[in-house]
């Protein structure tokens, strides 16, 4: 009897704790970043449309802007001399005619590279953008060429934190309400939020994992998000992430769901039908066609 009483007390304490956590949980604050959009789903050109032209280049962003996508998506690294540049990888080997890590190169060295060198749409039979003068752009060049255009910037795995210079350039070009920042790396995201709390951010890896687990055990109401968006693949490690209950639960926490990276007509249509808030694709032409925009 004594053990049963102890168990009962512990159970009541646990339930009281859950109730307290639920009552204390708060949805994400509404951010003016989303005032930029009046149609959903929001359309993201992943790296400017990496299957249409060399990604993360001004050329790709120009093509995406011509399609009237909502957001230009890109990745940020920092050079040896402290300049933010737009490139996906930590090194330049995969996309350019050069070799080396971005952080170990100066901007002048970066600018000598051909950013269209390895792009191909026929598995290497042809390389149509070689020698066309396509460069790795600085983030400043993106802001200057596309003033006031909403952007999604992913902070990559840099040796040196880039939160401070990134926050400064966002303010310099008055992009505080036009920028959404994301990173897989929780420490990088936490650092950026501390320095630049006024700029919208998406969830980092551990935050997404926590919400997915809570969602599966029907305890997502306990989650108090700092982020305003989950940017996720359909599934991860065999676990289905993007499903109706995940979307509805995210909405209950005032968090949008942006899915990456469907590229076929069938995949893109599936997520339009599912009702996600944003679709990030390397084929923004297909996305815009399906949405009849």
Image: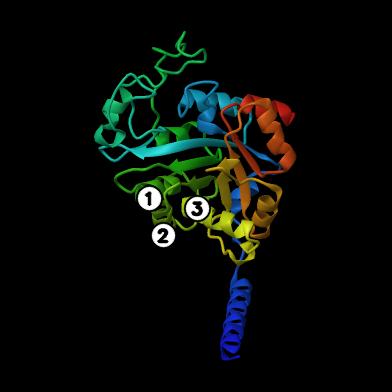
Spatial separation of the CA atoms under disc 3 and disc 1? 11 Å
- The residue beneath circle 1 is 163
Q: Is residue 168 visible?
A: yes
Please name the colour scheme applied to the rendered image: rainbow
Corner quadrant of residue 249: bottom right
Q: Is residue 245 above or below residue 62?
A: below
Q: Position of residue 54 (x, y in %)?
A: 47, 22
- Decide if residue 17 is on the left or right side of residue 100: right
- The residue beneath circle 2 is 194
The answer to whether the residue labelled 3 contacts the one labelled 1, judged by CB atoms less than 8 Å apart, is no
Q: Position of residue 245 (x, y in %)?
A: 69, 52
The answer to whether the residue labelled 1 contacts the one labelled 2, judged by CB atoms less than 8 Å apart, is yes
Residue lying furthest bottom: 2
**Front position among marks 2 and 3:** 2
Residue nearest the observer in this picture, 276 or 220: 220
Specify few, some or many for label 1: CA neighbours under 10 Å numbering under 14, 14-19, or 20 or more: some
- The residue beneath circle 3 is 199
Q: Position of residue 269 (x, y in %)?
A: 71, 32
**Mark 1 residue element:** helix
Sequence-first disc among 1 and 2: 1
Specify few, some or many for label 2: CA neighbours under 10 Å numbering under 14, 14-19, or 20 or more: few
Q: Is residue 41 above or below residue 25?
A: above
**Mark 2 residue element:** helix
Sequence-first disc among 2 and 3: 2
């Amino acid at each position: 009897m004594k053990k049963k009483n102890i168990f009962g007390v512990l159970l009541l304490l646990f339930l009281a704790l859950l109730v307290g956590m639920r009552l204390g949980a708060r949805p994400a604050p509404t951010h003016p970043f989303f005032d930029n959009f009046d149609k959903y789903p929001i359309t993201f050109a992943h790296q400017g449309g990496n299957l249409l032209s060399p990604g993360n280049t001004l050329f790709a962003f120009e093509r995406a802007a011509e399609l009237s996508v909502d957001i230009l998506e890109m990745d940020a690294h920092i050079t040896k001399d402290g300049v933010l540049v737009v490139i996906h990888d930590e090194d330049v080997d995969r996309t350019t005619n050069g070799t080396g890590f971005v952080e170990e190169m100066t901007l002048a060295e970066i600018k000598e590279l051909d950013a269209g060198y390895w792009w191909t749409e026929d598995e290497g039979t042809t390389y149509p953008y070689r020698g066309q003068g396509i460069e790795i752009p600085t983030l400043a060049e993106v802001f200057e060429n596309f003033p006031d255009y909403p952007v999604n910037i992913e902070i990559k795995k840099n040796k040196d934190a880039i939160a401070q210079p990134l926050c400064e350039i966002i303010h310099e070009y008055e992009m505080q309400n036009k920028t959404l920042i994301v990173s897989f790396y929780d420490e990088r995201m936490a650092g950026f939020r501390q320095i630049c709390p006024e700029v919208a951010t998406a969830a980092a890896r551990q935050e997404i994992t926590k919400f997915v687990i809570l969602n599966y055990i029907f305890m997502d109401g306990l989650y108090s998000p700092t982020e305003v968006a989950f940017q996720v693949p359909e599934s991860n490690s065999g676990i289905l992430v993007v499903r109706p209950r995940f979307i509805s639960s995210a909405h209950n926490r005032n968090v949008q769901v942006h899915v990456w990276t469907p590229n076929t007509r069938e995949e893109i249509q599936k997520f339009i039908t599912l009702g996600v808030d944003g679709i990030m694709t390397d084929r923004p032409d297909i996305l815009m066609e399906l949405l009849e925009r």
